[in-house]
């Protein structure tokens, strides 16, 4: 009976530790208001427009218990004959934003787009709290599609910077940022506007150091 009692107590102890860990993970997820998509839809930069990208963010957030917030993809669109441009910075609320571990990434829009954000490869995590491969890793996945200028606004109409406003998986280009804040391009340390991709297909995005990933923010 003594051994049975010891075994029972051990089971209870292990269960309590497991529950404590689960509660901690749930609390961290509840605090998450930003993540990089752990994987893209798989069709290059053809995301179904902003609506499709937003829905993808919501689906990934829901998969880790954070689907009760309004999620928006950090993507800009360029103006067309029938629609005005949309600025990525205008889509994501006012902050603050925390990653899946509850770590602050940026306090507000100004710090997010300035030099005082806390953005690093170690803090720009995916929805599961995993570090996303960067430059020097295999494969490199640090090119994150945004279609956005340094100040968070859309490019002028003309040269395609958004893969036909996130509907093309062929011709065109997408402006990308480096989530690890290193690499090449005109602005290699920018998390959201480093350079353009060589094309819009999955292969083209991968060929320039990406994987069709994008940023998701909860609107607060």
Image (spheres, grey):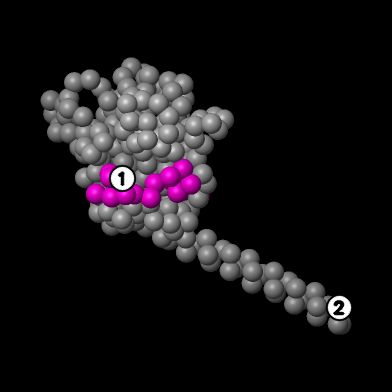
Report the residue at 43% width, 56% height from top. 103
Where's residue 58, x and y in %?
Answer: 38, 48
Element marked by disc 2: helix
Where's residue 65, x and y in %?
Answer: 46, 56
Residue designated by label 1: 115
**Of the pair 98 and 188, the residue shown nearer to us:** 188
Where's residue 188, x and y in %?
Answer: 37, 31
Q: Which secondary structure type mostly characterizes the magenta part of the structure?
A: loop
Label 2 crowd bin: few (<14), some (14–19), many (20+), radius 10 Å: few
Residue 158 placement: quadrant: top left
Report the residue at 33% width, 30% height from top. 187
Element marked by disc 1: loop
Left/right placement of residue 44 relative to residue 157 reads: right
Disc number for residue 61: none
Quarter placement of the N terminus: bottom right
Residue designated by label 2: 3
**Observer able to see residue 190:** yes
Q: Do the residues labelled 1 and 2 touch (CB within 8 Å)?
A: no
Q: Does the magenta stretch include residue 95?
A: no
Report the residue at 43% width, 45% height from top. 120
- Residue furthest to the bottom: 1
Marks 1 and 2 sit apart, C-alpha to C-alpha, by 61 Å
Q: What stretch is highlighted in magenta?
A: 110-128
- Residue furthest to the front: 115
Label 1 crowd bin: few (<14), some (14–19), many (20+), radius 10 Å: few
Report the residue at 31% width, 41% height from top. 74
Indicate whether 49 appears above or below 197.
Answer: below
């Amino acid at each position: 009976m003594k051994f049975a009692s010891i075994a029972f107590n051990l089971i209870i102890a292990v269960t309590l530790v497991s529950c404590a860990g689960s509660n901690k993970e749930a609390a961290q997820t509840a605090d998450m208001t930003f993540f990089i998509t752990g994987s893209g839809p798989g069709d290059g930069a053809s995301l179904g427009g902003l609506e499709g990208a937003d829905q993808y963010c919501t689906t990934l957030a829901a998969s880790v218990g954070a689907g009760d917030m309004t999620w928006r993809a950090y993507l800009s669109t360029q103006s067309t004959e029938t629609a005005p441009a949309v600025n990525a910075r205008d889509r994501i609320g006012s902050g603050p934003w925390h990653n899946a571990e509850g770590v602050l990434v940026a306090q507000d829009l100004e710090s997010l787009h300035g030099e005082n954000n806390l953005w690093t490869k170690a803090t720009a995590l995916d929805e599961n709290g995993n570090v996303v491969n960067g430059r020097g890793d295999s494969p490199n996945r640090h090119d994150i599609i945004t279609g956005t200028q340094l100040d968070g606004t859309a490019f002028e109409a003309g040269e395609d910077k958004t893969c036909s406003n996130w509907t093309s998986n062929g011709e065109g280009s997408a402006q990308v940022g480096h989530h690890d804040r290193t690499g090449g391009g005109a602005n290699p340390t920018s998390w959201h506007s480093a350079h353009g991709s060589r094309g819009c297909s999955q292969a083209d995005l991968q060929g320039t150091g990406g994987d069709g990933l994008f940023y998701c923010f909860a609107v607060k």
